[in-house]
Image (cartoon, grey):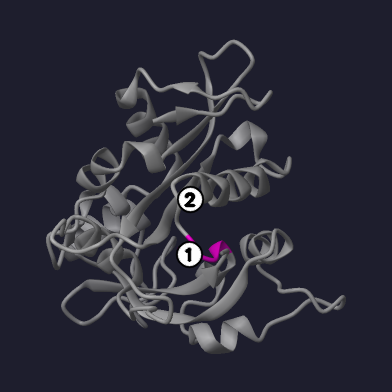
Amino acid sequence: MQILPIKKTVLQMRHPDKIYQFLHDGWPEFMWKATTEEDVNFYSAIEAFPHCQVIMMDDTLTEIIATSHGVIAPWENDYFPDTGYDQAIIDSLDHNHCLKTYVGLAVTIHPDYRGSGISAQMLVAMRNRAIELGLKRVIIPVKPPLKRQYPLMSMENFLEMKRDDGSHIDPWIRTQLKVGGVIKGVCHKSVELKATKEDWERWCGPINPDMTAKHLMAPLTEDYKYIEPNVWIQHL
């Protein structure tokens, strides 16, 4: 793995367990504990592509500030699967195919550094890493955080929501577009997770009558499956 300190020096990553703890602290608990429909293993994917991971450290090289994670999938230029995030992990681990497209899976920022512009730096670092690897395509199944406030709205309608200045209401989408990203469409079944009602309530709090809950971008199904839509954004 690469380490990208704030001063942009690149070193080798020596403590992957520290990265995993950083991710666990920064993501909703259900992303790690709910079960997947397919053999989707984030850990296996990023361990299979250590050269695709970028880590930003503080000046002492002891504290993780931000991480970006990605894989390389055997996808052609016009392929944007509806099963986005999950499909990227599954297909990247199928080494019988030529790997062509860098797929970004996550950018995570330490809470103390959010809003400082580091997320944009990590997106640029992700794109540059793909270029260094000789790849000509970078796409990301983006999770717009503000979508959680509109769980019953379709992602297509959410993408139409703009601020007075014409920019998108979602800050993560705005950041993606500011660094050159282009919206290519919606992956409606990007993440599929399942758990019991009790588990969802432990992770997200009470489930509303319309099957929505805190932290979720879409309502749960009747059998307590979570199907999360994401937005395909292309950076190269």
Q: Quadrant of residue 4?
A: top right
Q: Could you tell which of marks 1 and 2 lies nearer the N-terminus?
A: 2
Q: Secondary structure at mark 2?
A: helix
Q: In the image shown, does 37 or 220 lie closer to the viewer?
A: 37
Asked if the stretch drawn in magenta spans residue 140, the answer is yes
Left or right, 179 with respect to 151, comes to right
The stretch of residues the image draws in magenta is 136-145
Quadrant where the image shows the N terminus: top left
Give the percent coordinates (x, y) of residue 43: 24, 42
Give the percent coordinates (x, y) of residue 229: 40, 76
x 44%, y 46%: residue? 133
173 in relation to 223, above or below: above
Say which amino acid is labelled 2: Ala
Residue 137 badge: 1
Residue 130 badge: 2
Let me know if residue 142 appears in the view.
no
Q: Residue furthest top?
A: 60
Say which amino acid is labelled 1: Arg
Quadrant where the image shows the C terminus: bottom right
